[in-house]
Image (cartoon, rainbow, N blue to C red):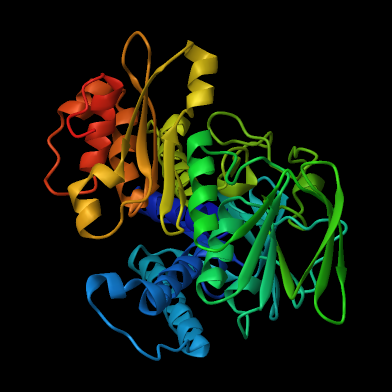
Amino acid sequence: MYDLAILGAGPAGYVCAIRAAQLGFNVVLIDKRPELGGTCLNVGCIPSKALLESSHHYHMAKHGLGAHGIKVQGAELDLPAMLGRKDGVVKQLTGGIGMLMKKNKITVKTGWGKLLAAGKVEVENANGREVVEATHIVIAAGSTPIELPFAKFDHTTILDSTDCLSLPAVPKHLAVIGAGVIGLEMGSIWARLGAKVTVLDVADRPVAIMDEDLGKEAQKLFTKQGMEFQLGAKVSAVEATQAGVKISFTNSRGEGQTLAADNVLVAVGRKAATAGMGLAEAGVKLTERGVIETDAHYQTNLPNVYAIGDCIAGPMLAHKGEEEGVALAEMLAGQRGHVNYNAIPWVVYTHPELAGVGLTEAEANAKYGPVKVGKFKFAANGRAIAVDATEGFVKVIAHPATDELLGVHIIGHNASEMIGEAACLIEFKASAEDLARCVHAHPTLSEAVKEAALASQGRALHA
């Protein structure tokens, strides 16, 4: 009998397990993969970031080092070596999770987890079936790629994001349906490695979930890098052909068009991976899309059965799942676990990167009326000029009356590292003036964050 059984060893599940073990719970962690870490570590966040970095180095060797006085001749792509490095990164990190389980005395069981009832789960693997009993059960099932009804994955021509991490050769032409985070990241990788990349999306800009200015700037910069965009495009059919794939769509002017490519990546989002887990049969309430319904304490309608991460409502982000795992473990221990959903950052790890936290300008205006906005371009930042990273800007949004920091949005080099400061200040309800008064080292890219905050006060120093 365990205190806590967790179904799913992704960031939400394994972090919940660690925090619960730290608080004295006897924990069992169950996952279908022998390699822990879920989608994120195995076929998501980590391998994609490894390839994004490697592909950027290749692109710089081919096209970007001359400006730094470095001549490179005959740079060649060794794709097997690049993919091998990616696999090595994944192996190192998944192995590290295994070590953390041992360190925290967490029992790990490999197999398909299925909820039988409150207090009971079944684990099925090649050795048979086992019933595990626990006082509390946490569902951390994660998510899987959404498949379009007219574009079923064949994993050869019609690809999901996992397929795109291990292509045996660089496609001559890769089409991407979906200009969101995954579509831009995967498209960016293969574009840097030499593929022609065409991105189609029904929205009028990339990453439509982020601030409008970031999406517009991203389209401009990625178009400059060679990616092509068909926005306002409604895809109606995807057909595998002898030469590759044919995509039929209606463009933004309502005209029917077709696009031929070698492969197509379908990156239109992800869905909760709750199918086959016995949840509905056990009585757990699910939405029509398979999302588990929970209350403010992550409890389902069944007593002592909880859910966290991608399989419940909210953004499907690893760090969101981690924080929910910590919060739930602390709640079960009688503490006050807490997640501020207004302070969860979004990041796109392209080059340049996109990052945002808090409200977009449109959301803030709708909620508070015309808000204060400050922008500062990296083209005026000394460190950005020195390292040849002048693309993009920082945008700060503040409350029109109280000056509370409502949102910060960045497109530029290392935006992912700079957004943490903004998330921290939003968490503690700081003002834009507070951010403007924080001393930032010179020369750093983060000075652009300070300058944008100053700009929201009408007193930028270097603009």
**Position above or below: 233 against 177:** above
Question: For the point 21% across and 22% down, which residue is it?
Answer: 459
Residue 186, percent from left and from top: 57, 64
Q: Nearer the viewer, residue 24 or 323?
A: 323
Specify the quadrant that holds the C terminus: top left
Residue 412, percent from left and from top: 37, 50
Camera sees residue 369: yes
Q: Is residue 437 left or right of residue 305?
A: left
Residue 391, percent from left and from top: 36, 50
Camera sees residue 24: no
Q: Is residue 156 left or right of residue 1?
A: right
Question: For the point 75% across and 48% down, which residue is it?
Answer: 279
Q: Nearer the viewer, residue 169 or 113?
A: 169
Q: Give the quarter of the image for residue 423.
A: top left
**Position above or below: 321 against 174:** above
Residue 95, percent from left and from top: 42, 75
Q: Residue furthest top?
A: 401
Q: Give the quarter of the image for residue 241.
A: bottom right
**Position above or below: 178 against 124:** above
Q: Nearer the viewer, residue 128 or 312?
A: 312
Question: For the point 24% across and 71% down, which residue is it?
Answer: 68
Specify the quadrant that holds the N terminus: bottom right
Question: For the point 70% across and 65% down, which residue is it?
Answer: 175
Q: How many marks?
A: 0
